Image (cartoon, grey):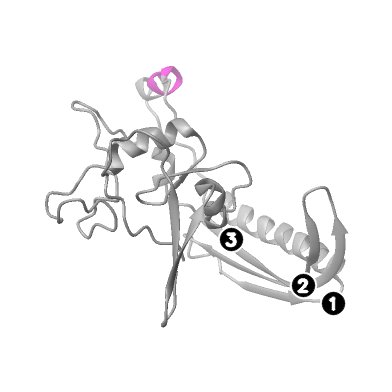
């Protein structure tokens, strides 16, 4: 693990800043020069392109402009900490908080996500990791997921619909996939039959129909 231990802010700000890595065991300690700080921090991210890291909190950014914007907030000294302490602040100085502008309004628009679903289907596959040897320009694939079983669980808001749990396994992955599709078709047919039995026309007045047809927002 890499931990930022000191960022004093001393000096005139003129000249080149250097970074040192301090390695220590139970007997001794030693400083090493870090020639390229961003390259040194590459191991902390799976991002393959260049990253720009803050020397105070060690967070990485995809562009230099984002880093500069962050540094202006990250290097503000905490009044509760001892003078000069800008890193590992226990009072949350390393967590930048950005409040909304005065007069801002937060509006919830995903009304459709509040609708209770009449039916729900949950399913999951179990797979075997089969060794392979497949190489491309940037990737070497050494394993592939081969399905060997699945489970389907169904439920509904209608009491007449009986939820069920379907489990199937087979060493042939093609049969597993084929059976999964077949079972989904059966589940769909049973759900649609139940739905049609509870489908009734909406009793709307002439004014309701007019408002419905002229509405520009559909929930």
> Residue 187's spot in the image, x, y percent?
67, 61
* The stretch drawn in magenta includes residue 110: no
Residue 171 tag number:
1
The magenta span reads 210-214
Q: Nearer the viewer, residue 117 or 59?
A: 59
Q: Secondary structure at mark 2?
A: strand
User: Where does residue 93 sit, x and y in percent of width and height?
Assistant: 24, 50
Q: Is residue 219 visible?
A: no
Pinpoint residue 167: horizontal percent, then vertical percent: 69, 75
Secondary structure found at label 1: loop
Task: Give above or below for 24 relative to 144.
Answer: below
Q: CA distance from mark 1 to mark 2?
A: 13 Å
Determine whether, in the image, residue 63 is placed left or right of residue 141.
left
Quick one: 184 or 192, which is closer to the camera?
184
Residue that carries the numbered disc 2 in the rendered image: 129
Looking at the image, is mark 3 or mark 2 earlier in the sequence? 3
Residue 27 falls in image quadrant: bottom left
Q: CA distance from mark 1 to mark 3?
A: 24 Å
At 54% from the left edge and 53% from the top edge, which residue is drawn?
40
Where is residue 47 shown, x and y percent of the image? 59, 48
Which numbered disc, 1 or 2, marks the residue closer to the eye? Answer: 2
Residue 187 at least partly seen: yes
Tell me which numbered mark, 1 or 3, is placed earlier along the sequence. 3
């Amino acid at each position: 693990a890499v931990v930022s231990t000191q960022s004093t802010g001393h000096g005139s700000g003129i000249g080149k800043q250097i970074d040192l890595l301090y390695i220590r065991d139970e007997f001794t300690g030693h400083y090493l020069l870090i020639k390229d700080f961003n390259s040194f921090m590459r191991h902390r991210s799976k991002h393959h392109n260049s990253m720009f890291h803050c020397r105070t909190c060690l967070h990485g950014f995809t562009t230099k402009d984002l880093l500069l914007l962050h540094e202006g907030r990250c290097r503000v000294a905490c009044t509760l900490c001892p003078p000069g302490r800008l890193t590992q602040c226990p009072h949350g100085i390393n967590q930048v908080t950005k409040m909304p502008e005065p007069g801002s309004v937060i509006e919830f628009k995903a009304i459709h996500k509040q609708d209770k679903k009449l039916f729900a289907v949950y399913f999951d596959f179990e797979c075997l990791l089969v060794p392979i040897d497949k190489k491309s320009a940037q990737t070497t694939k050494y394993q592939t997921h081969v399905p060997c079983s699945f489970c389907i669980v169904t439920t509904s808001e209608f009491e007449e619909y009986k939820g069920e749990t379907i489990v199937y396994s087979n060493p042939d992955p093609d049969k597993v996939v084929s059976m999964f599709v077949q079972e989904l078709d059966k589940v769909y047919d049973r759900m649609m039959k139940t739905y049609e039995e509870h489908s009734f026309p909406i009793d709307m007045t002439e004014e309701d129909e007019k408002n419905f047809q002229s509405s520009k927002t559909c929930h």
